[in-house]
Amino acid sequence: MPELPEAETIARDLDRRVRGGIVAGVHVTRPDILAPGNSATKLARSLRGHRIERVGRRGKNVVVDFDGGLKLVVNLGMTGRLIASDAPRSAEMRHVAARIELDDGRSVLYDDARRFGRLDLRDASTWTVRDAELGIEPLSKDFTGERLFALTRGSIVPLRNWLLDQRRVAGVGNIYANEALFRARVRPTRRARFLTRVEAIRLRDGLHEVLSKAIQARGTTIDDYRDGEGESGGFQLRLQVYGRTGEPCFRCGTPIKRIVLTNRSAFYCPRCQR
DNA sequence: AACGCGCCCTGTCCGC
DNA sequence: TGCGGACAGGGCGCGT
């Protein structure tokens, strides 16, 4: 998906465009994007008449808060897009799976070519459960190098995989995991428990830097991604290793390597990263 | 319990 | 131009 920076950008855009809107109707055209326990009729019945209080984010999820405590949790999978109907490129949404109509004529479109994404309606109490399943926010004050060091103790998982587990740290996906490891100068294959304290500090800093820069850039530009306005992401963030197989490392010139870890690509500089 | 794997589904790109 | 295969930013359920 959209990882944390993309979800953050979408949430901010939507918050600006649809906050305060009252739901007139919900239309689900592809019910397979509903999380277990949800149904099109339940969604429509539960949300009709409710006001959007704000749109926020938790990990990679866009969270729409309604009055009365209901929350629509949107996980965008690989190709999910969430935009307001009055956004510039709303016409380019060719796989609309659900539509939330507001009483003033605006609407929120959920588009998802591969339909790996999920919409999940929660009340205050079931949201607390879900929230607790997700790990620490990597941009929060609590996420220190020391905290990351402690979290990694005891796990034999390669760090690239470790970072993708949303129960540990929430919001990091394959692009930013690889980018942060490059900045920390640690190989994606390194077992989490062998990360040193100093490296944990560098990895925390690498994550913080790459995620916040990507937010400033309104998300990374990779083909499918669209922000809440329907536009592709910014170009300010230059990826250092992701997708750069064979190209020279920006730090030392050595060709970037691509390997496969549990069926997903990992990229690193064999000289800079140990 | 923690971990790796296969799978969900569609689109795109590359080589032949 | 057409076609097969590889690959894609995620996450769940399963067997070990």
Image (spheres, coloured by chain):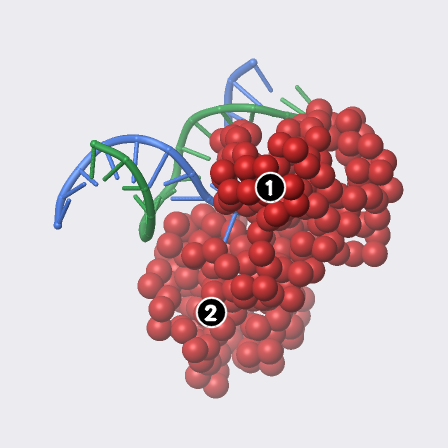
Chain colours: A red, B green, C blue
Give the x, y percent position of residue A82: 49, 65
Q: Which residue is mark 1?
A: A253
Which chain is mark 1 on? A
Residue drawn 71% across the image and 49% down it: A207
In the picture, residue A152 is in which quadrant? top right
Which chain is mark 2 on? A
Going by the numbered disc 1, the residue's amino acid type is Gly
Give the x, y percent position of residue A107: 46, 76
Give the x, y percent position of residue A220: 55, 58
Foreground tag (1 vs 2): 1
Q: Which residue is mark 2?
A: A231
Towards the viewer: A53 or C8: C8
Q: Is residue A161 above or below residue A120?
A: above
Residue situated furthest bottom in the rendering = A104
Towards the viewer: A197 or A90: A197
Residue drawn 51% across the image and 42% down it: A247
